Image (spheres, grey):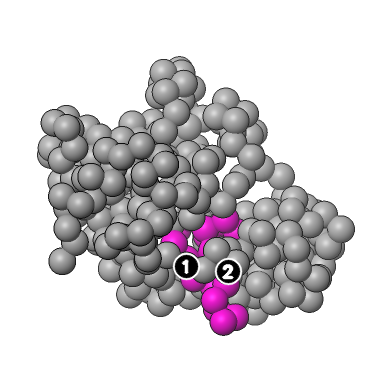
Amino acid sequence: MTDLDALAGLIRADSAARGRTISRLGYFCAPFRPVSGPFSDRVIKVYRGLDDRAELDRLAEAHDAYVAALKGAGVPMPDTEFHLVPVDGVTVPVVVQEALPEDALMRPRMQAGTREETLAMMSASGEVIARFWLNTRGSETRIGFHPSIRNFAIVEGEAVFFDTFPPLIGYSREEMGRLLLVFSDSRLMRTLGPLMKRRVTGIQDEWYSAPETLVGLVGSACRLRPEHAEAYLAWGRDFARDRMSPWAEEALPGLQEPPRLPGYWTGVRRLLGLQGEPNV
C-alpha cells in the first residue's frame, strides 16, 4: 500500500531532495525519480492541485477507468497508480509509476538507431496502436489514446506505453479542452489559454482518431529522422492497409508525404517553449 505521507514529503521537498528530474519540458508536469527511499524504483508525476474536490474525485475515477481500459485493450504498461495527496492544505493529483529503463525510451532510441532499428520500433509501437483501436472499436464510452513516440519505451522488442494523464475516457470534447487548460504546468498557458480556447481544445482531436494516431506517429518519426522519411511513409501505408484496415482509407492520404504538426499545436508549443522532450 502506497505511503501517502511519504509521497507528500517528496512533493514538498525541493528538487535536490526529490531526486533527478526525468524531463523538464512537458505540458502537464516535470516527472522525477527519487534517488532513494520507498519510491526509488518509481517515477513521480505531480500535477496542479485544485480546490474542487468533486472534480478531483471524478479525475481519480477516470484515471482508474482509463488504466483499466488500456490494459483491457492489450496495451502494455508499467505498474501505474493514481493518488490524491493532501499537501499543505491543497489536494494534488499524483501518478506513481514503475520506472522504465532510461535507455528504453523510444524517442532517444529513434534518434540514435539505424533505419532498420527505427522501423522495428515503429512496428512495435504500431502494433500497440492497432491493438488499442481494434479492441475499443464500437465502445459506447468516449475514449482516446496518445501514442506518440515520446510516450513509448521499447523493452525487449515490445512497445510499452506510459502516458495516462489526462485520462482520455469519459470526458466530452469540451470537458477535455478545459482539463488541458486547468492542469497545464504553464502559468502563461493557463492565463492566455482561455483566449485561444478553440486551439487548445483542438489539441486532443488526434488522440480520439484511430487514423490520426497512426499518421501522428509517422509524422513524429519523419521529423526526428528526415533522412528516413520515405521509409517511414512506406511503412505507414503498408501498416494502415495490413493492420488498421478499418481506417486505412482515412489514414492513407496523410501518409503520402511527411505529415506536419497542426498549426494549433505548433502555436501552443511555441507558447510553452516545448521542443518535444520525452514525457516519461
**How far from the left and from the top, in percent, is residue 205?**
49, 45
* Towards the viewer: 146 or 76: 76
Residue 118 found in image quarter: bottom right
**How far from the left and from the top, in percent, is residue 238?**
72, 74
Q: Secondary structure at mark 2?
A: helix
Q: Is residue 270 above or below residue 120?
A: above
Point out which mark residue 104 bears: 2
> Is 225 placed left or right of 203 in the picture?
right
Q: What residue is drawn where x is 31% and y is 53%?
A: 95
Q: What residue is drawn where x is 48% and y is 39%?
A: 27
Q: Secondary structure at mark 1?
A: loop
* Towards the viewer: 169 or 137: 169
Going by the numbered disc 2, the residue's amino acid type is: Ala
**How far from the left and from the top, in percent, is residue 1?**
15, 66
Q: What residue is drawn where x is 75% and y is 50%?
A: 223
For the question of whether residue 99 can be seen, the reply is: yes
Q: CA distance from mark 2 to mark 1?
A: 7 Å
Magenta region, residue range = 137-162
